[in-house]
Image (cartoon, helix red, strand yellow):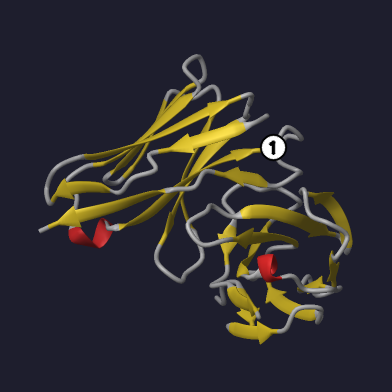
Amino acid sequence: DAGVTQSPTHLIKTRGQQVTLRCSPKSGHDTVSWYQQALGQGPQFIFQYYEEEERQRGNFPDRFSGHQFPNYSSELNVNALLLGDSALYLCASSFSASVYEQYFGPGTRLTVT
Amino acid sequence: SQKIEQNSEALNIQEGKTATLTCNYTNYSPAYLQWYRQDPGRGPVFLLLIRENEKEKRKERLKVTFDTTLKQSLFHITASQPADSATYLCALDGAGGGADGLTFGKGTHLIIQP
């Protein structure tokens, strides 16, 4: 049973560029949440996707957008990258829009130079 | 504003002893509280969930308490082992009953010394 997978593992981008991160949820899960984790901080909620719609959103600007596909996988897009966007981006999956017992992927380390 | 506080400094415990980690929160009325473990460069791993109407929850060597009056949760690891060394994160559901994601504390770095 595959757990949550994320790609790529690492990414280096330049300020102003755009990036797309990908996530496949754990088998049987239909909900994907995205978090940003800066060094030494806890994960911060970006948004959650369920039934291919953004259900809730944390305090992040519109530069952060996402998508969920019919197979429940998800993408996180960040436009106009800033140096402050450098962080570990975590995808978490769960069932039926809940945040109980979320299963996290290994994350994508994004570095913006 | 809503705030979650965990021991900000590293916690050093001798192997075999009980490690106790604290999570305090303000301006929240969470329906439940979760504890996660995170190893360097990895995603958090779910450990335990405790609901607001539960005082205590146990799982093997782990025990969590939840005091909604004190707005505090304690996380205990008994008979600690060096393999328990990691960062432990406390997480609360948002005001929307969980539909607006989890809010995490900064975590406590636990070091179990042989």
Q: Secondary structure at mark 1?
A: loop
Q: Percent x, y for residue B68?
A: 52, 19
Please, is residue A42 above or below residue A110 in the view? above
- Residue at image point 12% right, 51% down: B15
Amino acid on which disc 1 is placed: Gly
Question: Horizontal and vertical percent for residue B64?
Answer: 38, 35
Does B112 sit left or right of B101 as displayed? Answer: left
x and y, in percent, of residue A10 in the image:
58, 83
Depth check: A16 or A55 in front? A16
Quadrant where the N terminus of chain B is found in the figure = top right
Mark 1 crowd level (few <14, some 14–19, many ≥20, 10 Å Cα): many
In this rendering, the answer to whether A66 lies above or below A45 is below
Q: Is residue A8 visible?
A: no
Disc 1 target residue: B94
Work out which quarter of the rendered image holds the C terminus of chain B and state it: bottom left
User: How many numbered marks appear?
Assistant: 1
Q: Nearest the camera: A42 or A81?
A: A81
A15 horizontally vs A5: left or right: right
Q: Residue at x 63, y 24 (%)?
A: B27
Task: Tell me the residue at 76%/43% (across/down).
Answer: B99
B18 with respect to A41 (left or right): left
Seen from this angle, which residue lies furthest top? B69
In the image, A42 versus B33, the foreground residue is A42
For residue A4, above or below residue B114: below
Image location of residue B31, percent across then percent down: 63, 29
Q: On the image, which quarter does residue B21 sit in?
A: top left
Q: Quadrant of residue A38?
A: bottom right
Label 1 marks a residue whose chain is: B
Taking the spot 64% from the left edge, 45% from the top edge, the residue there is B102
Can residue B45 be seen here?
yes
